[in-house]
Image: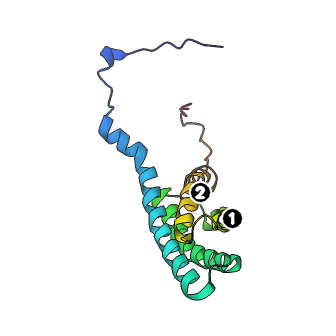
């Protein structure tokens, strides 16, 4: 069902304050900051993973799991703080967000281990496989963090406030 909506332009829309560059930057800045945060955390994760499988744990399934867990916990703490305070600028308490983040973190870590282990026969270079797997998980993680972990809490409007709702 289509519903026509009347559009009214006052003075030929002279009061429009749209700035293509500035407004585009504001739209994509959050994704860029998330990418920078993730890239920094991924570097910590990949360097630690590579060192751990080559020098400490080995390349068997148990070694991949141990290296994945240790490396991911090292990078995860950094990633949580960057995403909470810099990317999503969440002012919510740490407790609930940390539990949600740890849940995502654990699922993503286990999925990374399962996929890297499962794909390990394709190449002797486990680091390359890990980069491909974790790059895919990156996009899913952004959406989950944005919508469910660091989402802005709704506040109750006072009786004298006007509320404008924008639907997309």
Which residue is pictured at 53% across the width and 58% down the height? Answer: 135
Percent of width and height locating residue 161: 54, 37
Which residue is pictured at 59% across the width and 57% down the height? Answer: 137
Q: Which of 42 and 6 is in front in this view?
A: 42
Q: Is residue 128 left or right of residue 8?
A: right
N-terminal label among 2 and 1: 1
Percent of width and height locating residue 100: 67, 62
Q: Nearer the viewer, mark 2 or mark 1?
A: 1
User: Is the residue under label 1 in contact with that under label 2 (CB below 8 Å)?
Assistant: no
Q: Which of 46 and 107 is in front in this view?
A: 46
Percent of width and height locating residue 86: 45, 61
Q: Nearer the viewer, residue 117 or 44?
A: 117
Disc 2 secondary structure class: helix
Disc 1 secondary structure class: helix
Q: Residue under circle 1?
A: 118
> How would you rate the neighbour count of disc 1 (Cα within 10 Å): few for under 14, some for 14-19, many for 20 or more?
few
C-alpha span from label 2 to label 1: 15 Å
Q: In which quarter of the image is residue 53?
A: bottom right
Which residue is pictured at 64% across the width and 52% down the height? Answer: 148
Q: Residue under circle 2?
A: 137
Percent of width and height locating residue 47: 48, 76
Identify the image's colour scheme: rainbow, by chain, secondary structure or one colour.
rainbow
- Residue 91 visible in the picture: no
């Amino acid at each position: 069902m289509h519903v026509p909506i009347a559009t009214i332009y006052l003075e030929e829309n002279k009061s429009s304050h749209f700035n293509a560059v500035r407004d585009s930057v504001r739209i994509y800045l959050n994704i860029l900051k998330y990418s920078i945060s993730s890239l920094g955390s991924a570097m910590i994760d990949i360097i630690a993973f590579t060192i751990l499988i080559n020098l400490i744990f080995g390349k068997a399934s148990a070694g991949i799991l141990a290296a994945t867990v240790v490396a991911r916990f090292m990078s995860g703490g950094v990633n949580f703080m960057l995403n909470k305070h810099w990317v999503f600028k969440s002012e919510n308490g740490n407790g609930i967000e940390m539990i949600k983040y740890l849940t995502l973190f654990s699922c993503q870590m286990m999925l990374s281990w399962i996929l890297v282990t499962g794909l390990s026969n394709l190449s002797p270079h486990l680091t390359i496989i890990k980069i491909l797997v974790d790059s895919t998980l990156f996009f899913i993680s952004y959406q989950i963090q944005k919508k469910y972990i660091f989402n802005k809490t709704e506040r109750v409007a006072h009786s004298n406030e006007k509320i404008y709702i924008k639907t997309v």
